[in-house]
Image (cartoon, grey):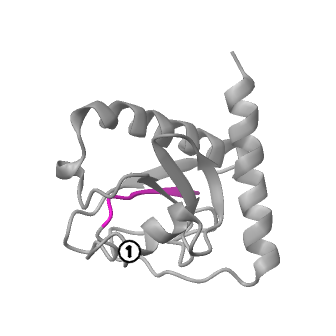
Amino acid sequence: MSTRECIFCKIIKGDAEGYIVFEDDISIAFLDVRPLNPGHCLLVPREHYETLMDIPDELIGPLFKNAKLISKAIEVGLEAQGIFVGINNRVSQSVPHLHIHIVPRNRGDNLKGFFWPRYPYKDRETILDIQNRIRGAINRLLIQP
């Protein structure tokens, strides 16, 4: 797949809609449109790397620092009891652009194993509310010492 065809590259360039919750020079995070739970985010490097094994070593630290920030923001912004963080490489990787799943978890959310049902948001208002809550939490976390 070329970067012209990659939906994540299109979101990064602003050529496709993405509900962005965070971005910096290294990466961008947006809501998954078929979330495991509301607030399920995808964190992707701005450059197109297909898998974790393809990304340069010097980007791993900054990328996972951002994963940590977004994880904390989801817990704070959505009052989640925990977070699931995962990466698929090739198998079950629906988009061949490295992406880190950051999923809010709560006891009794019925997510078991790796065969979880996925459901779209009920409406645009719901997705925008969740987007704004995570963005607000990221902003609050970035200004804390």
Q: Label 1: state its secondary structure.
A: loop
Q: Is residue 87 above or below residue 90?
A: above
Left or right of 20, for residue 137: right
Picture coordinates of residue 36 (x, y %)? 51, 71
Residue found at the very far top of the displayed protein? 145
Q: Looking at the image, can residue 76 be seen?
A: yes
Q: Is residue 143 above or below residue 38?
A: above
> To which residue does mark 1 refer?
4
Query: 16 or 96: which is nearer to us?
Result: 16
**Residue at the (58%, 47%) spot, across then down:** 23
**Residue at the (33%, 77%) spot, across then down:** 94
**Residue at the (23%, 58%) spot, across then down:** 51
Q: Looking at the image, can residue 111 be seen?
A: no
Inspect the image, locate mark 1, and give the three-letter code of the amino acid beneath it: Arg
**Residue at the (40%, 38%) spot, across then down:** 64
Picture coordinates of residue 17 (x, y %)? 62, 74
- The magenta-colored residue range is 97-106
